Image (cartoon, helix red, strand yellow):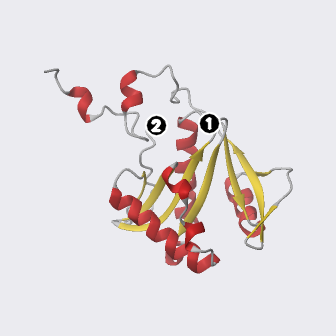
Amino acid sequence: MADEKIVPDIGHNALRIEVVTTPQQFLHVMGIRAICYTEDTHFPMDHAIDGNDYQCTHVICYLGDEPIGAGRIRWFKDFAKSERTAFRPRFREMRYLKAYCDFVFNHAAKKGYSRLMVHASPKYARLWRMKFGMKLVDKPSANYFGEEYVELVKHLDVPKDAITSDCSIETLFRTEGTWDRAARYETMPRP
């Protein structure tokens, strides 16, 4: 299954979820984060938007052409970490969050990761456990900005067609998340 877009059946609404590949999409992610993190959590802006934003994969959710949610995935040696998941207040519906999580889980698995980690406050940790099958890790919690954070993990089923060093050179040239379709320059004749 190509993971560049997941479009659940939600009636006439057109929900689409994509890996960020354009400056405009990146600005949409930053806008959503600024709205949600600085207002909802009162985190300072330099924490809501930080240096890790340049070393990760951003994911954006649109309803029609309206950006409604976003998050990022950071990649480590043997696990992926989902962070900064945020939906604008009027779009905080389980169907949107579920579609987003399914996309992130599938994307990480397609890259060959069998574990995905989340750090969350106990309030949201309960949601991650109950709705998305994540398990609490037996590790001391951390205190960040006066709030407790716990670690959760989800074990992912890595597909047989996961991206590995055995993939074709063409596949490894393709843009993040579009590994299943030929890139524009693959089909150009040689000069």
User: Left or right of 116: which side holds 67?
Assistant: left
**Does 159 sit above or below residue 66?**
above
User: Left or right of 129: which side holds 16?
Assistant: left
Q: Is residue 93 visible?
A: no
Which quadrant holds residue 114? top right
Give the residue number, with chain letter if any, for mark 1: 113
Of the 4 image quadrants, the one containing the C terminus is top left
Which quadrant holds residue 28? bottom left
Instruction: Return the residue nearer the eye: 174 or 61.
Output: 174
Instruction: Return the residue nearer the eye: 84 or 178.
Output: 84
What residue sits 33% from the left and 66% below the top?
Answer: 65
User: How would you rate the neighbour count of disc 1 (Cα within 10 Å): few for under 14, some for 14-19, many for 20 or more?
Assistant: many
Instruction: Return the residue nearer the eye: 10 or 40.
Output: 40
Give the residue number, with chain letter if any, for mark 2: 1
Nearer the N terminus, badge 2 or badge 1? 2
- The percent coordinates of residue 98 (x first, y second) are 57, 58
What residue sits 77% from the left and 74% below the top?
Answer: 146
User: Left or right of 111: which side holds 135?
Assistant: right
What residue sits 67% from the left and 54% below the top?
Answer: 132
- The percent coordinates of residue 159 (x first, y second) are 56, 31
User: How would you rate the neighbour count of disc 2 (Cα within 10 Å): few for under 14, some for 14-19, many for 20 or more?
Assistant: few
The type of residue carrying mark 2 is Met
Residue at disc 2, secondary structure: loop
User: Left or right of 32: which side holds 134?
Assistant: right
Residue at disc 1, secondary structure: loop
- The percent coordinates of residue 95 (x first, y second) are 54, 63
Which label sits on residue 58?
none
The type of residue carrying mark 1 is Tyr
